[in-house]
Image: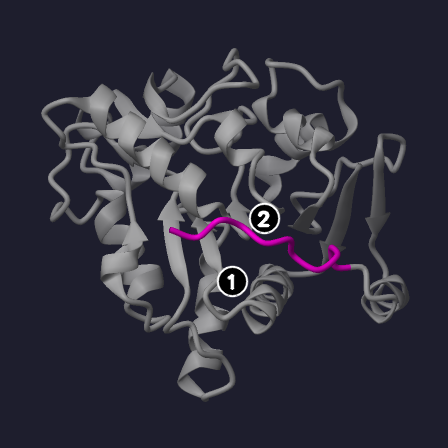
Amino acid sequence: MIRTLVLPTPADVGEAAADEIAAVVAERPDAVLGLATGDSPLGAYSTLADRVQRGELDLSRARGFALDEYVGLDPADPQSYRSVIDRTVTTPLRMRRAVVRVPDGAAADLAAAADEYERALEESGVDIQVLGIGSNGHIGFNEPGSAFGTRTRVVELSERTRLDNARFFPSLADVPTHALTQGLGTIMRARRIVLVAIGERKADAITAAVEGPISVDCPASVLQAHPHVLLIADEAAGSRLTDSGPCNIVRTNSEVRAWRGAGTRAPSLPSFSRH
């Protein structure tokens, strides 16, 4: 079951997602964070940065793994996810760049780079994975049709994904056609998952992920099989949820207060092997 929190504004979503991440770091200061890019997680990262700036949160011992990276972009390219993670996570959260990893989309041997990244993830584990969702239901760059057991690998981006991401590039022709991404099986190994969704254009994907059948047609639907997933959506993204699916939806202010007061975060984290 996907626990679902629908909040009034994107700012509320960012605060709630930051609360979940901060709670994990408070419990385990050397936590491993799974890091998503895109618009949806930015509010959470900004909120965390404010807390770090005020001295309320210390992420200096935390480590991170990005979900994915474009193939063929130099890491110094402003649109590479190495650069995006540096700008939005590593620097403002005062994390050590050397322990915030991003797949090597510029590697000469992409298959070997994918295998090495997967091994590193298996060895360290991920304590909390932050996810966004594509308008076609993808998580990471696992497009519709991706098998649920997939591991880190090179994938071809769908035309819809490239169109969605074209706003970050001079033209559609400049959007990479391939990416190196964690697989659905890789993502599902995370101890906790926070799925963040903002805006009406994510409403159909969220509804399919939460209330539809578990199907490769909507890769995010696999999250229904994870024991500790929290979806945090603003009202626009959650506008088509009907409360009829396998989820527990909290919408009103009183429900949110009760939900938080009940201590509904996932249980204490089991130990990972940390090499």
Q: In which quarter of the image is the N terminus?
A: top right
If you read the primary sequence from the N terminus, does the residue marked by circle 1 or circle 2 appear first? 1
Q: Dot 2, how many residues are within 10 Å of its Cα: few (below 14), some (14-19), or many (20+)?
A: many
For the residue marked with disc 2, what is the amino acid? Val
User: For the residue labelled by badge 2, is the local secondary structure a helix, a strand or a loop?
Assistant: strand
Residue at 29% from the left image edge and 57% from the top image edge: 99
Residues at discs 1 and 2 in contact (Cβ within 8 Å): yes
Q: Main secondary structure of the magenta part?
A: loop
| Image location of residue 35, percent across then percent down | 43, 50
12 sits to left or right of 51: right
233 sits to left or right of 211: left
Q: Dot 1, how many residues are within 10 Å of its Cα: few (below 14), some (14-19), or many (20+)?
A: many
Residue at 13% from the left image edge and 45% from the top image edge: 77
| Image location of residue 168, percent across then percent down | 28, 42
* 211 versus 251 height, above or below: above
User: For the residue labelled by badge 1, is the local secondary structure a helix, a strand or a loop?
Assistant: helix
For the residue marked with disc 1, what is the amino acid? Ala
207 sits to left or right of 136: right
Residue identified by numbered label 1? 44
Residue at 59% from the left image edge and 64% from the top image edge: 24
| Span shown in magenta | 265-275
Checking the image for residue 196, the label placed there is 2
